[in-house]
Image (spheres, rainbow, N blue to C red):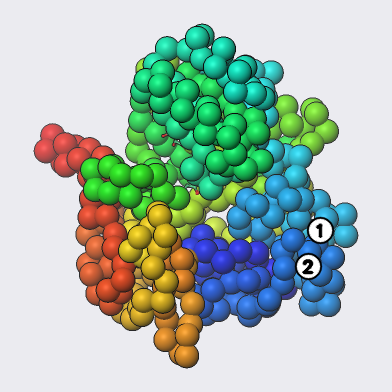
Amino acid sequence: MNILLLGNGGREHALAWKLAQSERCTALFAAPGNPGIAEHATLVDLDLADHATVIAFCRTQAVGLVVVGPEAPLVDGIADSLRAAGIPVFGPSAAAAQLEGSKGFTKDLCREADIPTAGYVRCTSAAQALAALDGFSLPVVIKADGLAAGKGVIIALTRAEAEAAIADMFGGSFGASGAEVVLEEFMEGEEASFFALTDGTDVVAFGSAQDHKRVGDGDTGPNTGGMGAYSPASVLTPALEAEVMARIIRPTVATLAQRGTPYSGVLFAGLMLTTEGPKLIEYNCRFGDPECQVLMMRLESDLVELLLAVAQGALAGATAPVLADMAALTIVLAAKGYPGTPEKGAPITLPSAPDGSRIFQAGTALRDGQLVANGGRVLNVTAVGQSVTQARDTAYALADQVAFPGGFCRRDLGWREVAREALAGAD
Ligand code: AMP
Ligand code: GLY
């Protein structure tokens, strides 16, 4: 089967690597891809906003499955266009992708389906938001409703900070994404990510992960798209996973199906493990980046078979995904300046990765045959191990062999899990 993968980050490099391993994969194309993805796929220059051109390419190349990596084309309806053209696609419709595209949409769905989440109010004006603020204790969470590349969330510790955030969002800092704002109760606990595949009816678990959102060691500094991740998240015990499936994931899938807008693709739930049990922070309508990289390192199943079963509404007949009983950890090497303005163009020389390790490329480009940095998050140095501690040690040893003077990484990735493993080992 010929497959087209859409996207150009480290997540898509990991997907390309895994898709290309499948016996079902005859030819893999990627648009726009990157130099790492080019090791596994033929790169094609398609404008993802131009659905007719994407469809025409699929017809010319007899593409039997399109895999959509990032959220923006999904929210923009690429999956609807492909489905209408009869082309199987892994990724939700625009209507179902509202789970990521609108925080208010998700909160209303949680209310309707009695899904545990923080209390909230949706506001369409600054005056309404300021009035609603009185109903919340501090800290209070203020969110731009629409897509904001992970930057549209402010945790205000004081009333003045909350008022400033409201003024900022309605003042246009997030463009149309901030035309509506959600005020939320602050939840306390440890965060974990949970992934599930669904074809709109059936649902299977696809593993857990934890990431590091802050740019600096000790979880300090500004938020990023993620500076590293590991899988599994041992805090999400089998009992908690079962609770998440029963109280959060399945009711979401059932409610969207009842509404006539079934969700097909991967559901990525950001969870807060509170003293009252797991609560939903937010949904993403795609794999996490860099969470996908660690999941793919652990995945033993044929990825094409799984994604095709989702795309064709045949998940019930598919073999459930198997993730190796190993840990995986990925280190993001970012360009200096990230998450502000990253420096572009710094040269990179990669070492060869031993078995059990991979270097996925995210923001890279080739200039006159030289690999250079071309984005904020540039490389994902990834390794598996018997424990997160072991995976971390292997990944850092490899990261230290990468020649990338224009880059930096956190040195403390996995610290929560490493501490837990040290405690367990000392028992
Ligand atoms: P989101 O983009 O909704 O995942 O929010 C980004 C980050 O803000 C989350 O990963 C949490 O660390 C934090 N956050 C969001 N909502 C809440 C909440 N209601 N209570 C506490 N922290 C939150
Ligand atoms: N790493 C978080 C995300 O992909 O949204």
For the N terminus, the quadrant is: bottom right
Q: Is 353 rendered above or below residue 96?
A: below
Between disc 1 and disc 2, whose residue precedes?
2
> Which quadrant of the figure has residue 210?
top left
Amino acid under disc 1 = Leu
Question: Can you tell which mark lies on residue 94?
Answer: none
Cα separation, mark 1 vs mark 2, equals 8 Å
Q: Is mark 1 within 8 Å of ligand 2?
A: no
Residue at horizontal 58 percent and vertical 35 percent from the top? 171
Answer left or right for 57 relative to 21: right
Residue at horizontal 54 percent and vertical 74 percent from the top? 34
Q: Is residue 183 visible?
A: yes
Q: Is 218 rendered above or below residue 258?
A: below
Q: Is mark 2 within 8 Å of ligand 2?
A: no
As drawn, the residue found furthest toward the top would be: 135
The answer to which of 396 and 406 lies nearer the viewer is 406
Identify the element where label 1 is drawn. Answer: helix
Residue at horizontal 20 percent and vertical 40 percent from the top? 419
**Image location of residue 216, percent across then percent down:** 27, 49
Amino acid under disc 2 = Val
**Image location of residue 158, percent across then percent down:** 37, 20
Label 1: which residue? 82
Q: Residues within 10 Å of mark 2 (few under 14, many from 20)?
A: many
**Image location of residue 406, percent across then percent down:** 31, 71
Answer left or right for 380 relative to 288: left
As drawn, the residue found furthest toward the right would be: 85
Residue at horizontal 47 percent and vertical 23 percent from the top? 163
Identify the element where label 2 is drawn. Answer: helix
The answer to which of 116 and 407 lies nearer the viewer is 407
Question: Can you tell which mark lies on residue 54?
Answer: 2
